[in-house]
Amino acid sequence: MPALFVAVVFAQLGTAFPVSGASYATASRLVSPLVAFVTAWVLVLALLLFAMPLMAAGFAIYTMQLVPPGAMEPGRRDLVMLALALSSVAFFTLLNLARIRWMMWVQSVLTVMAIAALLVFGAGGILFGEVSNTRPLFPGGPWPILAAVVPAYIMYSGVNAITEMGGETADPGRTIPRIMGISIAILVVVYSAITYAIVALLPYRTLAEGSVTDAAAVFMGRGPAIAVMATGAVCAAVTTMNGVIAFISRDIMQIARQGALPAGLARVSERSGTPARAVLVVGAISAAGLVLLAILGEKSAVRVASVVSQGFMLMSILASVAILRLPRVFPERYAAAGFRLRSPYLEIFTIGTIVIFSTLLVIGWIQDPATLLAFGILVATGLAYHLVRRPRRVPADTPLDE
């Protein structure tokens, strides 16, 4: 439900402002340049320092599942995993320096492979799972479910990525709403199926790290389960990494265009048409985040996911405020948008998103105060940078692509 509200809001945003880095550009014009910058700062750093390393580590962990147990000494295995994680960041950084069409072809193929593996698992759970394993529905009451929504939302957080590449999208007025609708439909079907499958195949009290593979082994055997689920997980991890590099580099490019980051980060390569310097910065910070994750340890994965989700939630709240003001501040853009929310649906989806995510933020901070501390540090560093740099103020009537 939160993702559905967000998809509708960002579909309106992406069609009214079909430019790269649309979230920041829109919020800076319709809300506040300072608030937009701090929110983008929090989201970018949360993604690059926390989410990207988490995905790279996931890629390495599941790749190593394909290596027979005992084939390597534990110390050497850890080094190989670190090398795999760093190599994945380097590869997708380089891929994003190439032409956008090549990157998207790779993304499409790997996404199909990931979805196929998840559908096999979901179908197996529906066919071979025990319905009795899903009862009682809330064994610990509703609070753990609400608290789990915050870190779990990271699985849906990429739904707005297409709006960040609106300037490189053909016919964004039609394409963006369609992609949003198709994406949400696929996500709901696939994630609902795998969530049911893992609980139906294994009693919930036995769930732990590696349970997805254990659950798949119930209906396909241990060897095939490792091969199918590891391949699917690897594809899911690398497509997430590739997507993050693509859309966050566009955010950085747009922030630089608006004067809040060094102007060099806004340059677009004449050869490939991509923001090459912004892509390299994304890759470098992500590699540094891997080192940070190694220091924090894998047990902090849920906390890391919560901080990243909270960054997306903050950006979603800001985007909703911007879209709520859109018809009044930029009536011509609102009228020309290929997808247009009319009253009262505009108010329902924007205010609904604000209420939902404000509530989830509070729940996340109550559940784990450490995420509030991390969130506060990111906000404080963003404010400090903005106050020290004192970026030039861009006139409201300046075209968004300048």
Image (cartoon, rainbow, N blue to C red):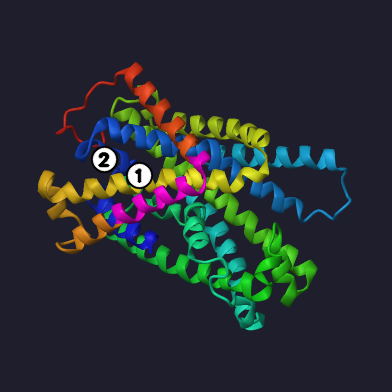
**Residue 392: image location, x then y, percent:** 25, 21
**Residue 176: image location, x then y, percent:** 32, 57
**Does residue 133 sit above or below 146 in this rendering?**
below
Would residue 84 be seen by someone viewing this image from the given angle? yes
Q: Nearer the viewer, residue 71 or 294?
A: 294
CB atoms at circles 2 and 1 under 8 Å apart?
yes
Q: Which mark is residue 163?
A: none
Q: Which mark is residue 27?
A: 2
Q: Quadrant of residue 383?
A: top left
**Does residue 287 sit above or below 301 in this rendering?**
above
Q: Residue at x 42, y 43 (%)?
A: 311
State yes or no: residue 173 in magenta. no
- Spatial CA distance of label 2 from label 1 is 9 Å
Tag 1 residue: 315
The type of residue carrying mark 2 is Ala
- Please tell me which of labels 2 and 1 falls first in the chain: 2
Quarter placement of the N terminus = bottom left
**Residue 64: image location, x then y, percent:** 76, 51
State yes or no: residue 362 in magenta. yes
